[in-house]
Image (spheres, rainbow, N blue to C red):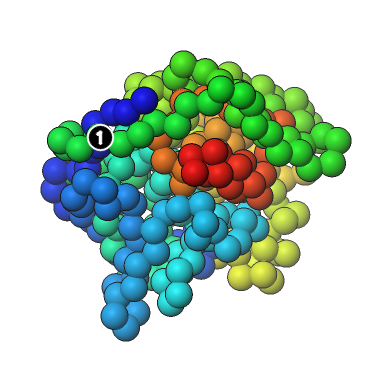
Amino acid sequence: MNRKQHTIQKSVTYKGNGLHSGLPVTMTMHPAKAGTGILFRRVDLAGAPTVAAKSQNITNTMRATTLEDGAAKVFTVEHVLSALFALHIDNCLIEMDSAEPPVGDGSSKTFVDMVLEGGIEEQEETIPVLTLDHSVAVYEGDKKFIAALPYDGLRVTFTSMNPHPLLGCQTLDVILDEESYRKEISPARTIGFTWELEAMRKMGLGKGGTLENAVVYSEDKCLSKLRFQDELVRHKILDILGDISLVGPLQAHIIAVLGSHKLNAELSEKLQALKK
């Protein structure tokens, strides 16, 4: 199965700070010719090296997805990639003057807005869409897993089980297209807990997080204003789409329970092997 490739019509820029590094960054999305794929270019480094958004370039999945190729390294790219994937942007050059994209509002809405501002251009060349004739799954222990099943379209079902009194068990099943992604998934922000913050800061993470660009829970309350009562599972689906985008266009029903960037990356590797 094939469909036409897409890029953006014009360059668009956004400035902000990274979620984990807290460092200022200017990010510009540029149109790219067919067959380019999604490329990150580090304009702050000598020679402006690039790293392609491909599953084989994943080097770390602790709390975010890191891509690395030689001197070019970028991390926390899943929100950008999620927006591009959902809007069918196959070719785009993303220039950054730091290793981490801007956090925006903690969701992928900032990057959806960038794409819409730049405009979407259909290209003459086609790109293959991976379809499945059997299921593919990755397990971690006896409770966590992610699986991709044959499906005519794109659908994600995510289940979270959290001991926090305001969270508990949450499940969301969504059939994805541009409209449902923009309304139901894109605005959902990343989740954090107050007891994790000190440990994260010691690891150099979460320096750019606020109560506005993350949904923060204390032991008994939510300190941020929720956009959805089940914002946690919606953001988990957002992350899955960003991580799975490294495989390229895909038709599947993805089902995850207690998923993670690590499991997403392992599923991406299995799906990439099917393409070969």
Instruction: From the viewer's side, name the closer residue of 159 and 26.
Output: 159
Q: Residue at x 45, y 32 (%)?
A: 130
Q: Amino acid at mark 1?
A: Thr
Instruction: From the viewer's side, name the closer residue of 75 and 224.
Output: 75
Decide if residue 92 is on the left or right side of residue 63. Answer: left
Q: Is residue 76 above or below residue 82?
A: below
Residue 229: image location, x then y, percent: 59, 25
Place residue 23 in its image quadrant.
bottom left
How many numbered discs sit on the rendered protein? 1
Q: Residue furthest bottom?
A: 46
Label 1: which residue?
126
Q: Residue at x 49, y 44 (%)?
A: 276
Name the element at disc 1: strand
Decide if residue 274 is on the left or right side of residue 198. Answer: left
Residue 264: image location, x then y, percent: 61, 43
Decide if residue 251 is on the left or right side of residue 63. Answer: left
Q: Is residue 154 above or below residue 90?
A: above
Place residue 113 in its image quadrant.
top left
Q: Is residue 212 above or below residue 171?
A: below
Residue 12 visible, this angle? no
Q: Residue furthest right?
A: 142
Q: Residue at x 27, y 52 (%)?
A: 36
Residue 168: image location, x then y, percent: 76, 28
The N terminus, quarter of image: top left
Q: Is residue 47 above or below residue 32?
A: below
Residue 150 visible, this angle? yes
Q: Residue at x 66, y 22 (%)?
A: 171
Question: How dense is the environment of label 1, judged by Cα within 10 Å: few (below 14), some, or many (20 and up)?
Answer: some
Residue 245: image location, x then y, percent: 45, 42
Decide if residue 49 is on the left or right side of residue 76. Answer: left
